[in-house]
Amino acid sequence: MHHRARQPIPPTCTAQHAAGRRNFLRGSALATLAAALGGPIPFADKLAPGLFPDALAQTVADLLPDKRGLRVLSDRPIVAETPVTLLDDDLTPIERHFVRNNGHVPERAEKRDLTGWSLTIDGEVDKPLKLTLAELQSQFPKVTRALVIECAGNGRAAFNPPASGNQWTLGGVGCANYTGVRLGDVLRRAGVKQSAVYIGYQSEDAHLSRAPGKHAISRGVPIAKALDEHTLLVWEMNGQPLPALHGWPLRLVCPGWPASTSGKWLTRIWVRDREHDGEKMTGHSYRMPKFPVAPGTKVEAADMAILEQLPVKSVITLPASGAEVPAAQSVLLRGHAWSGWGDVKAMHLSYDFGATWVAAKLSAPRNRFAWQRWSVELKLPTKGYYEVWARATDEKGFQQPMLVPGWNPEGYCNNAMHRIALKAV
Ligand SMILES: Nc1nc2c(c(=O)[nH]1)N[C@H]1C(S)=C(S)[C@@H](COP(=O)(O)O)O[C@H]1N2
Ligand SMILES: [Mo]
């Protein structure tokens, strides 16, 4: 992207959020920014992650014109999260759905050019397939499902010591309606061999370096998850063709698992006879220590295990933290809850720092792996400062922890309870 200064350098920058502790603009990125602003930024080390200098606010809107209100965490690659109050919709509208790119959006997607595109299914199959979009759309049963996808790093900003990577707060999650076919139906058409262990996806987005032949990301899931009826190949999001940013013409959705398994801009599903070893499958990527470690511990790669189901979690989308509400009167609170293990079974809130808990009304999911709406009317007894804590419990009995759970080197799976401040007046 190109930065254009449209206003003079502002004398100060106001922090929009204070969750991050480190400046994500370093070295050349900082120099580029300073050049765009026409001068150095004396307090650059105090610039919170995700905070763009006011003078460039217009440029951020240029970067993601269809995503107004999202917080840009990185512009190269593009990463943006949804402020939690903008997650209030039953289904996340496209303009409010977070974005996490690892490389460059393919030109094909920008231009909506299907020329030469097909999906290859090969590897450990009896009959490799090459399918056009029209063939995929006409030859398999069509399904529409509301599905949560969540970046495994959602919540990372709260880890201490900090984990490197995008400093997500709460908004690396969304639940949209996807239309496509079951990956399992397509794999069965190709005939999955006994030797199949894993699938790996390949996509058309160039690596950040633009090194030819190097994938930005190529992850996968064990064959059982690939064959699971909830794992889809989709071409529509909320009834529209997939937007360029979300993987046009075709993406995977592996609900409940790290969203990095939901490959965008697909060209190939490679059925493997071993654990897939593509870009960001190995080393520390999307892996957690096999046993608890003290914060800050350096963990050997051999002691890390691939992340699978994401833990139970919830958000309070209404009211906003810091809101003033009437004392001793009913106040409506609501949000969503979800779990990588299946249904959420209970939702509780506390406004006395966890001493007592109130059960919220919890709706059934539209389908498995959709998030569930919860709502509750609370009466804050007197004037004063309150905190509301929200805790979901899933069908396996897992509950959200009060504190940030198990520190891990890459800062994954923070499902601590969402807390908001309320001032009763
Ligand atoms: N081809 C490709 N697929 C991808 C990615 C990517 O960079 N390239 N990012 C992954 C990651 S890390 C996440 S969190 C989700 C984000 O999906 P979204 O941008 O549609 O919200 O896409 C996943 N699929
Ligand atoms: Mo992600």
Image (tube, grey):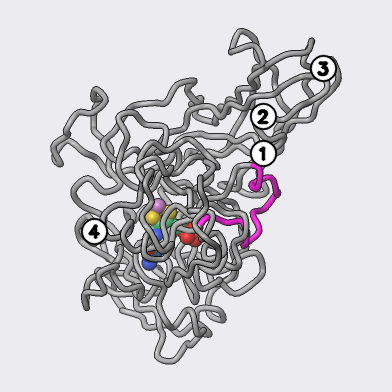
Q: Residue 327 carries which label?
A: 3
Q: How far apart are marks 2 and 4 (CA)?
A: 46 Å
- Residue 251 is at least partly visible in this image: yes
Name the residue nearer the viewer: 153 or 121: 153
Residue type at mark 2: give it.
Gly
**In the shown orientation, is residue 333 left or right of residue 32?**
right
Q: Percent x, y for residue 200? A: 30, 63
Relative vertical location of residue 317 with respect to residue 215 in this rendering, above or below = above
Name the residue nearer the viewer: 352 or 200: 352
Which mark lies nearer to you, 1 or 4? 1
Q: Quadrant of ligand 1?
A: bottom left
Q: Percent x, y for residue 388? A: 64, 22
- The residue at which mark 1 appears reads as 317
Residue 93 drawn in magenta: yes
Which mark lies nearer to you, 3 or 4? 3
Q: Tell which residue pokes out farthest to the right in this image.
A: 329
Q: How far apart are marks 3 and 4 (CA)?
A: 56 Å
Q: Which of marks 3 and 2 is nearer the N terminus?
A: 2
Residue 10 drawn in magenta: no
Q: Earlier in the sequence, mark 3 or mark 4?
A: 4
Q: Which mark is residue 276?
A: 4
Relative vertical location of residue 359 with respect to residue 301 in this rendering, above or below = above
Q: How far apart are marks 1 and 4 (CA)?
A: 37 Å
Q: How far apart are marks 3 and 2 (CA)?
A: 14 Å
Residue type at mark 3: give it.
Ala
Q: How crowded is mark 2: few (under 14 residues within 10 Å), some or many (20 or more)?
A: few
Relative vertical location of residue 179 with respect to residue 54 in this rendering, above or below = below
- The residue at which mark 2 appears reads as 322
Q: What stretch is highlighted in magenta?
A: 85-98
